[in-house]
Amino acid sequence: MRLRVRWPWTLALLLCGSAWAQSAPLRLTMQEAIRLGLQANLSVLVAEARSGEAAGTVERRRSLLQPRVRIETPVALQNRSLAAMGIVVPHVSLPQVTGTYSTYDARTYADQAIVDRQALHALRSSRLSASAAASDYQDARDEVIRSVAGQYLAAQSQFADAASAASRVDTAEALYKLAADQRDAGVAMGIDVLRAQVQLANEQQSLVQARNRAQGSLLALARMIGISPGTAIELADPLEYHAASAIAVDAVLPQALAARPDYQSLIRQRGALSEQLDASRARSLPRLLASGNYGGIGRNPGSICSTGTIQVEVAFTVFDRDRQGEQAEIEARIRRIERQLADARLGVEQELRQALLDLDSAAEEVRVAGVGLGLAEKELDLARLRFSQGVTNNIEVISAQDALARAQQNRIIALTHHADARISMVRALGNTEGSYAEYLGSR
């Protein structure tokens, strides 16, 4: 009986727990969002696959310089045409085709390249290509970090805007109540109440729009980090100001070039092409190869005798017209990479200088916006006081409310600009994955 009584309660608790788990929002920090984005982003997954493919190519190139051993055990039942083989005995009548006979052979074959410059340069080229692919993989991860952080920042900005709109609604409601009280006391007129109602309606509409934009930004963020857009998300990191250390571009440019995976990928691609060019030139050089075999052969298993061969072979190409075209093709690729490197160097320097300009400008924006917000709040307080004392109508209050809304929006924009400039700076400096958490001030 006790078991029957407990089951309904247990089932009810499980259902309640399941419903609570489904309704509880996912508290998402910027670091957690970036971690999920790195796991789910397609460009990262594709770059990782290409890196693995390049590593496999290295193994294939290495195998050309390593011993190759195989075992063959043919069993043959055959006959031969003596005339076709040129076996003719004068004055002796031989059959045209021999009788059927069998052979048994079990043999191990081994080959080893002793000197092969072409294969050696091909191996070095594949290693550099694999290193370039690894840099491309890291660059894809850094780009995802930049994108996810930017989307998280956009969501922070939208929610800050929604919170600001909610506070303005509260203020508008209080001012509407004040206008109604003043009218009832005979201090204010009906037009003052109407103005307050209009302002309240405007602020409520702004709040609805701000909340819709905020929820839309979460949908975009969920899509970017690979979770269901229907997942309830709560941003754990608020939009805040984090001061950035001053840097000198000329001092950090060499370190940035060394840390930028996109720039390093181009350098390694150029090195791989140089090795390919050396491999093409080595096609005319002699190759020294050693090979051998050992096993047993006989007409039947009982008559098998051991035999073997060891040989050293020198092989070289006398005429190969294709080499010239191949070298011209590789040299053109090298020139293209060198031009890309020169442009990439200028691009990195431009990104650093632009990020530094944006940081300085945004920091000043934040300071000025903070001052403006403080003044707007004082203006609204003073206008409210004057209206409550009957000194003036509430036109001053409405104007002060509009000024406060602009000041709040200016501060949100300034904070967003500064945070985005920090994201751009950490991307320009390189080593994004290793330093973004400290530089962005994320928890």
Image (spheres, rainbow, N blue to C red):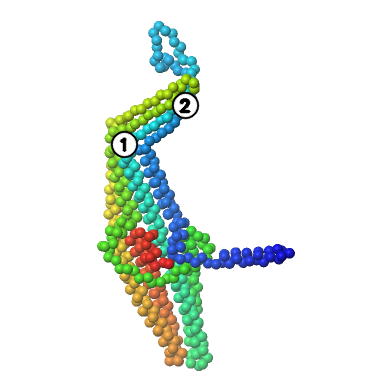
Q: Secondary structure at mark 1?
A: loop
The tag on residue 116 is: 1
Q: Amino acid at mark 2?
A: Pro
Cβ atoms at labels 2 and 1 below 8 Å apart: no
Residue 106, located in which quarter of the rendered image? top left
Q: Quadrant of the N terminus?
A: bottom right
Q: What residue is shown at x 35% (from left), y 63% (from top)?
A: 426
Q: Secondary structure at mark 2?
A: loop
Measured along the vertical axis of the image, is residue 124 above or below residue 155?
above
Residue 69, located in which quarter of the rendered image? top left
Q: Amino acid at mark 1?
A: Asp
Measured along the vertical axis of the image, is residue 63 above or below residue 108?
below
Is residue 154 visible from the viewing direction of this image? Answer: no
Query: Left or right: where does residue 334 sit relative to residue 220?
Result: left
Q: Can you identify the residue that label 2 sits on?
A: 74
Task: Give the percent coordinates (x, y) of residue 276.
Answer: 31, 42
Residue 145, located in which quarter of the rendered image? bottom left
* Residue found farthest to the right: 1
* Residue found farthest to the bottom: 186
Measured along the vertical axis of the image, is residue 275 above or below residue 155?
above
Query: Left or right: where does residue 37 sit relative to residue 121?
Result: right
Q: How many marks?
A: 2
Task: Give the percent coordinates (x, y) of residue 248.
Answer: 27, 65
Question: First in sequence: mark 2 or mark 1?
Answer: 2
Q: Nearer the viewer, residue 250 or 416?
A: 250
The tag on residue 94 is: none
Task: Give the percent coordinates (x, y) of residue 290.
Answer: 34, 31
Q: What residue is shown at x 30% (from left), y 38% (from top)?
A: 117
